[in-house]
Amino acid sequence: MIDEAFLSGDRDLTEDDLRPYLTPLGKSMDLTPIDERFEEIREDDTIGAQDSQIDAELASTLHKTLDLTRNEASDAGLWHYLCVVRFSDLVHYRWDHVYDPEDPDNMKEKFLKAGADIYSNALHRIWWAAELTYDEAESGEPEDRDYERTRKVLEFQELANDIFDRWFARYRPVAVSCVDLLCHEALNEIKEEGEYSDPPSNSKIASDTTTLLREELTVRRVEAMEEDEIVDTIRSLREEVLRGEAE
Amino acid sequence: MSVGNEDSETDESEEEEIQTGSLVTQSLPHTFERDALSFEVDEFRLDGVELNDQGNLNESDQVLSLVGESGWDLLEVEGTVELQSDTIQEVFPPEEWEDSPGRLALVKTNRLAINRSREILSDAPIEAGTHPFEIQLDRDEYRGTVNLEPYLVRSDNRDPGPTNCASKAGSRLANGEPWVVRLDEPTDGGGLLMPIIEDFEDTDRLPDDNHIHHLSLDEPRNPQLYLNRGHPQVVNVLENEGATGGPPRLRDVLYDYIEHSVWTQLLIQTARDTDTDTGETKHSWQDDVLEIFIDDLYPELDEDMAAVQLATDVRSVEDLPALVQKIEQAVHQRYDIPQDTTKLIEEAIQNDN
């Protein structure tokens, strides 16, 4: 069913088409805020089709609207339904540039991958990026949550890939610290201080620091570390990269 | 047993481990006491009530299965972790044997629900002794299998010295054998091993009639197990749904044989399809395979690095034999051939009498 015609956007799949394979989640949600936000993004002249900025702009609405427990969010079928049936237009708008009829797997995974892979499925990845980086409000209400960190990481796609493609990001304190220390704002501020004569690009700093972090965490148990220890570790590795000391 | 400590005298078992090329001795650059923490669970409670008939508790394997149990919100686990003074003296340098800068934590991981958390049982200065804990698992926050594993780590940095003791905060110093809590059946796309029964002689896609089963990976996204209808007595036994008696016992032994072959193939394929840089698999069923086996294959490594190591080893001529042996042992853990075979033999003897 997820064939070339569907992946190329020439054919839609409806609930009726997939009826034999659908099972109820056991929960009702009004998904129109996501439709409305998508329309706003489409009409925004500063954001083009296939622009990674779409993820950053959509994340808070998607996460607040899909108010899911982790148990629910880990149901791959939910994301398959949302991508294949409910929001296939959105997925095509964001990801059509990866479709290659000679090698359709890249496009297929935008619709079908999910589960423990928080890197591939188009909506699943945005939801989990938000889940792992937002700050809860004192009120506890979804509408009061702070998604500034989510916006920062999704605006910087290389950083998003470097973080969420790795198992260490599944531990929230690491994901949070990585974004806080490696986002454009943080790195540009450091560079403006002028301490480093020839610092690498932000993409390289993010990539090399997260690679070093992955290696570093193989000998540590990160869940048993305190937040300041995690921050110090990432900051120290970032320093190595800024000074050109990392290989 | 300490590993990776080149400066001290090693006993014969450690030397043997090094000689067989075990990856365990090469994976941490400092002293690590594997399974040195004694992890005991005294009580499980579902919504405040002790488990009676609910679930399936296997204390010797440290597994609690709540698969099929519904209508509960909170699982409470109460128990202790014991840290021995010998362990402290193995993993900390002598000047830190008093007021040891260690932290004891119980780590909860659940791959499917992207859930990693911890309970700190004791912070520095860490002392030998029995440390109690009580943790909670909210049903809404987990899916699949939850691993509970105690760890002793360093709580601060020190300058590296002459010993092989760790020097960085968070360094793994010791662990304990984990408890596994199964909440759901593995999600495998709808029946990874639900077999299709066909006559192998009728098609070229399947091997010859000498086979009673075949695992097809022709459709990589959906591995499919076939049973050979050409051996009807065998198929009848495999389809038996009883719990006692000769046919069910024979069924169990036959499935042990089939599962051994199937899981081995699935693991090898998963290893081949795993990216050597990122540890990412190609197909979602392979994440389930990794979840089942990766801790047994590479207990010293983080899941991320373990997947990378698996992908690397399967491509290495030198490391492949050791990997095959590890896979053999890990797959063997999935079932109890001696018990199943013994039951079959007892059944046969009883029928003879």
Image: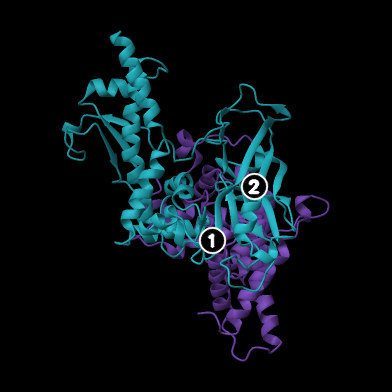
What amino acid is at disc 1?
Arg
Residue B255 in sight here: yes
What amino acid is at disc 2?
Leu
Q: Chain of mark 2?
A: A
Residue B205: image x %, image y %?
21, 40
Q: CA distance from mark 1 to mark 2?
A: 30 Å
Q: Is residue B58 left or right of residue B169?
A: left
Q: For numbered disc 1, what is the local secondary structure? A: loop
Q: Colour of chain A?
A: purple
- Can you say whether B346 is above or below B66 in the image? above
Q: For numbered disc 2, what is the local secondary structure? A: loop
Q: Residues within 10 Å of mark 1 (few under 14, many from 20)?
A: many
Residue B15: image x %, image y %?
41, 58
User: Residue B240, labelled with which disc?
Assistant: none
Q: Is residue B136 left or right of residue A100?
A: right
Q: Residue at point 38% right, 21% down?
A: B343
| Residue placed most toward the observer, B243 or A172 | B243
Q: Residues within 10 Å of mark 2 (few under 14, many from 20)?
A: some
Residue B221: image x %, image y %?
37, 47
Q: Chain of mark 1?
A: A
Which image quadrant: the N terminus of chain A? Answer: top left
Residue B67: image x %, image y %?
55, 31
Residue A38 in sight here: no
Say if mark 1 contacts mark 2, CB within 8 Å. no
User: Residue A31, labelled with which disc?
Assistant: 2
Q: Residue at point 56% right, 67% down?
A: B164
- Can you say whether A104 is above or below A13 in the image? below
Which colour style is shown? by chain
Q: Residue at point 47% right, 56% down?
A: B306
Instruction: Tell me which numbered mark, 1 or 2, is placed earlier along the sequence.
Output: 2
User: Residue A166, labelled with which disc?
Assistant: 1
Q: Which chain is cyan?
A: B
